Image (spheres, coloured by chain):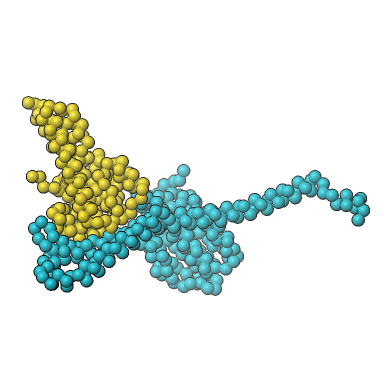
Amino acid sequence: MKKMKVLLVDDEIEFVTTLSNRLGMRGIKTDVVHDGEQALEYVKKDEPDVMVLDLKMPGMYGMEVLRQLSKTNPNIQVVILTGHGTDRDEDESKRLKAFDYLRKPTDIDTLADRIQGAYSFKMESIMTAATFAEAGEFDTAREIAKESESPKTVGEMFKDEEKK
Amino acid sequence: MSSRGVACYAPTKEVICTKIKQIDCRRAGKKRVYMSGLSLRTAQLQVLGGALAHLAHDVQNHLAIINESAGWMKDLMEYKSKKRLGRIGSLFNRGKQRAVLEPYMNNLKAIETHIKQASIITRRLGSFAHGLEKSRSVFDPGKVLEEIQDVLMKQTSDKGIRLELKLTGEALMIETDPSVFQLAVFENVEYVMKTLESGDCLTLESGLWEGQFQVRLTGPCSGGVIKNSGKQDFNWYIIENLGGQIQKRFVDEECVTIMAFALTGSEERD
């Protein structure tokens, strides 16, 4: 079974280190970066399934990271975890299709649930798209894939199927 | 008094019109004073609202760290993952030793409860918030000073101090939070006014000095001048978030307060 890849992006080192440890105890292994630029660099090398993203960070603001990801890597499920949280930010993150929006301090089990939920959503979308593709419903599969899955994986699978 | 006498005091149409105009002018004057007072308070509240949003965010961050640290201790004591017990918990988990942990657990629960309460309060404070996105930006501080000049005039005239503004026409771009920049100017003016007396003149200049954008406040060097005040006199929040240098110089010859910022660009203003 594919192992879930989670990236935590937060400039508060003490906070994010402890968070990573606690998620680890709950069976969720995570990598950690401390600003938006590092997050985008990380994504280029190794795309995570779920990203837990702070908003207010030095350099690139978290919302800008989300905006870029929504264009380049729409398959990454993003959970916003912020100490700020205006309604405007929440609305904007929903518009950019963030999976969830949580405010700090949050309950660890709630966060772990949301991460699992985001991963399940992604995997379900892949499986659904794959099922349609297997049945020869390529257009439907492609639509599902567009909404939530990476063109690198399902997209390539379509090409193989269509060649047959 | 005869009826003729009364009649000679009867106001003419012109007198009545003049009186009405005078009354209207007085009312308008009072209304202007009232409205300018309101606009001063509104502008100050707007600036404070922005500052408050940042403060609320910073407090939330500290609460989150405390919450995670307390939670981590709790995890170590009691959390049972699929593979193992919390490390400390496993030491105490046998028999009566479990009771040893109880006071620690109770205190950690109390910490968590109070963090939740404190968090609700700071969220309420944050509801004053402006969005933090783009709070730090590259902007023309001269324009910001122009926007608040009426409020600055009101702030000083209320105490009988004449404010002379000499703002640069050049767009000198700096990078910081505009609302904190405004707050710093207001606070700076307020601070300098403590050394002034009614009737004194205060000059606020902005421009390019020593390759930096500077806001200089110069007052007369009369009695009560604060000598060689350091930047510690400033609000810590401003120092932390302004991203510029604040130098205070109150010396006998030169009574001036300086806020200095590195330039990120300059151009002719439209």
Relative vertical location of residue A14 with respect to residue A94 in this rendering, above or below = below
Tally the numbered discs: 0
Give the quadrant of residue B232: bottom left
A126 or B26, nearer to the observer: A126
B118 or B213, nearer to the observer: B118
Q: Can residue B213 be seen in this view?
A: no
The structure residue drawn at horizontal position 33% and vertical position 54%, both measured from the top left corner, is A84
Q: Quadrant of the N terminus of chain B?
A: bottom right
The structure residue drawn at horizontal position 63% and vertical position 54%, both measured from the top left corner, is B30
Give the quadrant of residue B179: bottom left
Say left or right for B200 vs A130: right
Q: Report x, y in % for residue B156.
A: 55, 61
Q: Report x, y in % for residue A113.
A: 20, 50
B34 or B213, nearer to the observer: B34
The structure residue drawn at horizontal position 31% and vertical position 41%, both measured from the top left corner, is A95
Say left or right for A71 vs A129: right
Say left or right for A72 vs B187: left
Relative vertical location of residue B10 with respect to residue A72 in this rendering, above or below = below
Q: Report x, y in % for residue B259.
A: 42, 61
Relative vertical location of residue A42 with respect to residue A13 in this rendering, above or below = above
Name the tint of chain B in the rendering: cyan
A33 or A149, nearer to the observer: A149
The structure residue drawn at horizontal position 23% and vertical position 61%, both measured from the top left corner, is B68
Chain for colour yellow: A
Q: Is residue B25 visible?
A: yes
Q: Report x, y in % for residue A93.
A: 30, 45
| View extreme (front): residue | B96
